[in-house]
Image (spheres, rainbow, N blue to C red):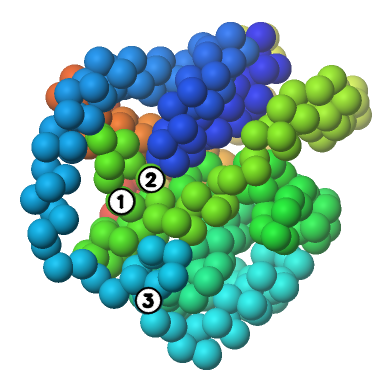
Amino acid sequence: MESNRDEAQRCVRIGRAALEAGDRERARRFLHKAERLYPSAQARDLLEALDKDNCTSENESQSTKASAGQEQSKPSAPTGASGETVKRFTKEQMEGVQRIKKCETYYEVLSVSKDAGEEDLKKAYRKLALKFHPDKNHAPGATDAFKKIGNAYAVLSNPEKRKQYDLTGSEDQVHSHHRNGSFDFHRGFEADITPEDLFNMFFGGGFPSGSVHSFSNGRARYSHHQHQHHSGHDREDERGDGGFSMFIQLMPIIVLILVSLLSQFMVSNPPYSLYPRAGVGQTIKRVTENLKITYYVNKDFQSEYSGMLLQKLEKNIEEDYVANIRNNCWRERQQKSDLTHAAKVYRDERLRMKAESLSMENCKELQRLTSIYRGG
């Protein structure tokens, strides 16, 4: 059942996107599928919120009709021939969107080299995210460009995802296309967090106008750009459920498992572990000199490691530990963000309290490590 986790997470992401687009039936279908593949609190919470919304939708519909007459008397904003609000954009903004659309790799999207470091990625993302945020850039395709920029940063800033991405090649090889040339962000290398949440983490909430999300009958959804992006996905999502497609998706995991099994026969065990391992004798507790990270070694460790060799090993231990804590903190933030978003959309006090009660232990530990770095 553990092998179904990735597919279940993909179904949860599709279901959440369908909820934001207002398609409750599609959301329910994929959330139930996620529960069958690999039960999770994330899918259950969204299903509970969806069931609760069904009970209140009829009352909300009646109140909407009652207020419709009043809103007709209010002056309306300028609209185009299709009835949508006319939003102006510059030639430079349009050219920028076209450039992002033509980029074949994430490095081209962020305009960085393949050896770009963390600070270079952050600087490039901040500049582009502010330029292409849909609240500021109203050119056609700006929302898709914004998502692509966020996805590029989320993948390249994650060491594991970046390594896999570099091995695979260009974006055309990991994303499937659909009509109108837009990308299917539900497949291939996708971020563990939405582009909007990533933007809010960098800029503390982003732009206040709120045109990226519009609310109707208690359901959050993107503006008309989001509807254009999600239209036509049903056929491709159903096609991805086939056995051959599943095999292709699982192929990298199978290869990694085989490589891991082979490495166990070819490579000796590391001289340390972050947890006690009685099977290999690593039960003696030690602490790194710099960050005070606890690790475990065997009885022959002190005779083999000392001086510069010990310092180098402890540096590797600390890097391993920090990377693990950073990834766990990222997941904790995503879980809290999902619960908070669902509580806000469905006005569910229980979900809000659950989000606030999350301990966020890994994020607290990451904050402690960061303070040590700054102090040093």
Tag 3: amino acid: Lys
- Residue drawn where x is 40% and y is 72% of the image: 80
Look at mark 1 in the image and give the residue it sits on: 214
Q: Which residue is at the front of the view, 1 or 119?
A: 1
**In the rendered view of the protein, which quadrant contains the N terminus?**
top right
Q: Quadrant of the C terminus?
A: bottom left
Give the spatial CA distance, label 3 vs label 1. 16 Å
> Tag on residue 356?
none
Query: What's the amino acid at mark 1?
Result: Ser
The residues tagged by marks 3 and 2 sit, at their Cα atoms, a distance apart of 19 Å
Q: How many marks?
A: 3
Q: What mark, if any, has residue 87 been given in the picture? A: 3
Q: Nearer the viewer, residue 168 or 267?
A: 168
Where is residue 9 drawn, in percent x and y? 57, 27
Q: Residues within 10 Å of mark 2 (few under 14, many from 20)?
A: many
Q: Residue at position x 26%, y 60% from top? A: 210
Spatial CA distance of label 1 from label 2 is 6 Å
Instruction: Please tell me which residue is depicted at 50% across the width and 50% down the height of the picture.
Output: 227
Q: Which residue is mark 2?
A: 221
Amino acid under label 2? Arg
